[in-house]
Amino acid sequence: MNHAMKRRDFVAGIGVLASSSLLQCATAQSATTEILIRGGRIVNADGVRAADVRIVGETIAEVGLSLVPGADARIIEAKGRLVMPGGIDPHTHFGGRFVDDITDGSRAALAGGITTLGTFATTQPSEQIKDAIERHSGYARQQAIADIFLHGQTWPPNPAAMPVLAELGQPSFKIFPRLDFEMHIGALLQMLESARAAGVVSLIHCEDGQLVAAATRRLQAAGRTSLQAFAESRPAIAELAATQRAAAFCESTGAPMYVVHLSLARALDACRAARAAGLPLFVETRPLYLFLTEQRLLGPEGPLHVGMPPLRSASDVAALWGGLIDGSIDVLATDHAPSTRAMKLDPALSITNSRAGVSDLQFMLPMYFSEGTGKRGLSLERFVATTSTNAARIFGLYPRKGVLQAGSDADLAIWDPAAVAKVTASGGFSKSDYTVYEGTNVTGWPVMTMRRGQVVFENGCVTGQPGSGRLLAREQWRPQDRR
Ligand SMILES: [Zn+2]
């Protein structure tokens, strides 16, 4: 039985289906001309209302009350369900050193209510950015079931790459604090000026390389190089300093900047100050920092939780929830970076040679929904804003994606808000064989996912086929795309 046809059993466990081990996963039917989703509650970032959704082909034709189905329409009853825009996760890694390719990642994403993925097109030595985008576009066209967009990544900074990214319809790129970062600040600022002119958004990983190197050197001198010391090797001050500097780059150049996986209350405060001053600085966090604290990094299984920046304190966790609720964090993204348990627990790993990242695509939205809307006072509107609408706006996909309204792509997930399930790696589509959230009870789960009008996940099966996902051409960033 190949992976595509393997039905994942956890959905049966949540009682949304009649449990049946005989249930077969069929290939998705070619798109029905019309689908009517009837009787659900439609959630957008600006409000929740009872309405039907009529889908014709790949797009939403109509959202309204008591819509009458056409003669050949497939009718989906959504009474008691929430109908939400498909999630947009702009921060995912596939292939290379990670165990999921874009097909695996698509399956995990679609089963978890996410329909669009942003991933990275990193140049190889002496490769031009245009060729890196073309090469990764090829992987996406071959492997994707979810829709895909690409962030360019190249080093040292190359101002000429910015208009090229905009022309290719992929107006974003990633800055990572490599060890030679300080040598290239001049060129980096020129690149950011070019990014501003071209409407390109810069994603920036905020950990100061020199401060990390200093902390690491002190630990090495004390003979403490095992991953038990991982959090100490990447201290809070390294993230704070780099975040403040990102705000300085943003103020100096006016370029739109997007801080990836922010983990720290003090860094969030630095971003709040920058935003209060009107800077186009956007903030992302990820699930690791919402559910786990630094204690998890200790003990023999600690290395399973390694990510950069490291896990933080309980007060940081509370601050991040506060930021998601009050609007100072724009996006929750996975930074999906899957490895196996054996790879993460490899005894050869150390603070100078670590394997960062976890698998998160399938469980991010259900866990966030359950904890956020169920326990922390996150509104349904903010749930959609932080998992779909804001990413669509920042990355040039709105209103084609990120909203349920006439004319938008019919990307959506139908949720059973009362479904109860346990998170378990064995119920996942990722090739990562563990999850750091194993055994967590969750209330609320997507039971059906549509991507451009095609049902690509239902009854626990991902029915969409590799190659059916589309490489999305995006609009350049404009100042009015601020929140
Ligand atoms: Zn990443």
Image (tube, rainbow, N blue to C red):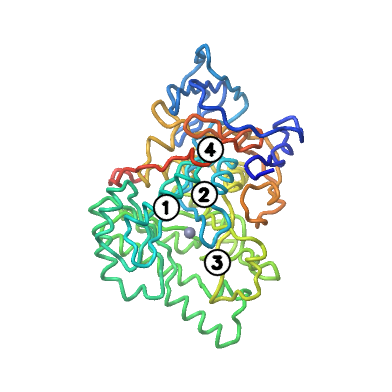
Whole-angstrom CA distance, mark 1 to mark 2, is 10 Å
Judge whether 232 appears above or below 166 on screen: below
> What is the total number of numbered labels drawn onto the structure image?
4
* Residue for badge 2: 102
Q: Nearer the viewer, mark 4 or mark 1?
A: 1
1 vs 3, front mark: 1
How many C-alpha atoms fall within 10 Å of the one at disc 4: few (<14), some, or many (≥20)? Answer: some
Mark whose residue sits in front, 2 or 3: 2
Query: In this picture, is 290 found above or below 182?
Result: above
Height in image: 464 above or below 97? above
| Residue to which mark 4 is pinned | 380
* Marks 1 and 2 close (CB-CB < 8 Å): no
Whole-percent x and y of residue 96? Answer: 51, 60
Label 4 near label 2: C-beta < 8 Å? no
Q: Name the amino acid, label 2.
A: Ile
Badge 2: how crowded within 10 Å, few (<14), some, or many (20+)? many
Residue named by callout 1: 136
Q: Name the residue: 44% across, 44% down.
A: 141
Q: Dots 1 and 3: beta carbons under 8 Å?
A: no
> How far apart, in angstroms, are the residues tagged by discs 3 and 4?
29 Å
The amino acid type of the residue labelled 1 equals His
Front-most of residues 140 and 247: 140
Q: Earlier in the sequence, mark 4 or mark 1?
A: 1
Q: Which residue is mark 3?
A: 310
Cα separation between marks 2 and 4: 29 Å
Quarter assignment of residue 474: top left
Query: Could you tell me if the residues under marks 4 and 1 are in contact, i.e. CB atoms within 8 Å?
Result: no
Helix, strand or loop status at disc 4: helix
In the image, what residue type sits under mark 3? Pro
Lower sequence index among marks 2 and 3: 2
| Residue lying at 69% horizontally and 42% vertically, measured from the top left | 8
Q: Secondary structure at mark 3?
A: loop
